[in-house]
Image: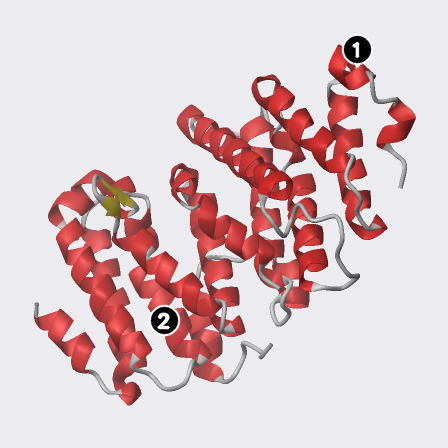
Amino acid sequence: MGLQKILKNAGEISVLPMLRCVRLNIELLASQIQDPAEFFRGGISIEMMWLLVNSSWILHISCNKRRVAPIAALLSSVLHQSTFGDQLMHKSDDGPGPMKWFVEKILEEGTKSPRTIRLAALHLCGLWLAYPNTLQYYIKELKLLTSYGSAELAENHDARAEVSVLSRSLDPELTDVFINTELYARISVAVMFSKLADIAYSDKCTSRNEDKCAIISSGKLFLLELLSSVVNEKDLSKELYKKYSAIHRRKVRAWQMICALARFVDLDIVEEVTLSLHTSIQRNNLPSVRQYMETFAIYIYLKFPSLFTVPEISTVSKHQWLVT
């Protein structure tokens, strides 16, 4: 309760040192407990985490400016690696867990703050890669990051120091190129799923079977959600839209991510996938959208060539699938 009161009443000048103090305390607790399960029972409880996320959020929204260092410190202290792996932090019987609630708040604000959403993408993708069992709770947030489309992140020494504490970049070279662009959020998600697919489908990978199952399940879930969106959502299913319009850009982003998720198509979902693909590819779309549909279609039919013998698909000629 003392920490909650201090965080709520901290002045803007105290935000950064206060959040660093929170992070240090969590790290000290984690370093003293070897077993993660014991950490959640004897270190930070769900009730304590609810107090932390609520107090930290009040502290965050009380700041007049959205500076890089405090945002990065907020993410690294509240969404700490030592606590992120506990599934109770993300979902409870009656709604979202404390971390899920906090992520929703951060990304909601991030739609108006490019810095916030890019820092969140950097940190969250690293956490999701480390704890793939939590991905299932964040399909809506993954969609938001995928469709997000700018101020620079490196303001000063404090900013650079706090950004360095966030989860390690999934691809340092891509981060250097895209971190200060609106592309970064969705590129982070695409790279994350590419690396997750490497883990899930590689015989050489030493990851636990339950992690591989969680990765495959989440990849399929996200892919089917995106396909459902491009088929059924009002904007994404439109056939008449202007080039470079908001709808056009959203369509391109959605199909780019669908292509990035193609490796997750297995026999158990291929029928549902091809049905959505068939529906989409018969609609009118600009070439810049259609090229991704066709790329995805080519991948699927190379992976599952027997699909060409299915009666309901063979009624559409192979050539017709690739007409632009």
Q: Is residue 190 visible?
A: yes
Q: Which residue is mark 1?
A: 309
Tell me the element at label 1: helix
Q: Is residue 35 visible?
A: no
Q: Residue at x 82, y 51 (%)?
A: 286
Q: Residue at x 28, y 69 (%)?
A: 57
Residue 261: x %, y % from top left: 63, 38
Give the camera-side residue of 71 and 236: 236
Residues at badges 2 and 1 in contact (C-beta under 8 Å)?
no
> Which amino acid is tagged 1?
Thr
Residue 49: x %, y % from top left: 20, 56
Tell me how far mark 2 sits from mark 1, CA to CA.
56 Å
Image quadrant assignment for residue 79? bottom left
Q: Quadrant of the N terminus?
A: bottom left
Q: Is residue 5 above or below residue 236?
A: below
Tell me the element at label 2: helix
243 lies left or right of 31: right
Q: How is the image coloured?
A: secondary structure
Q: Is residue 319 above or below residue 305?
A: below
Residue 268: x %, y % from top left: 56, 18
Query: Which label is found at residue 73?
Result: 2
Q: Residue furthest left?
A: 1
> Which callout, 2 or 1, points at the residue further toward the start of the chain?
2
Give the camera-side residue of 173 and 150: 150
Query: Which label is found at residue 133?
Result: none
> Which amino acid is tagged 2?
Ala
Mark whose residue sits in front, 2 or 1: 1
Q: Quadrant of the C terminus?
A: top right
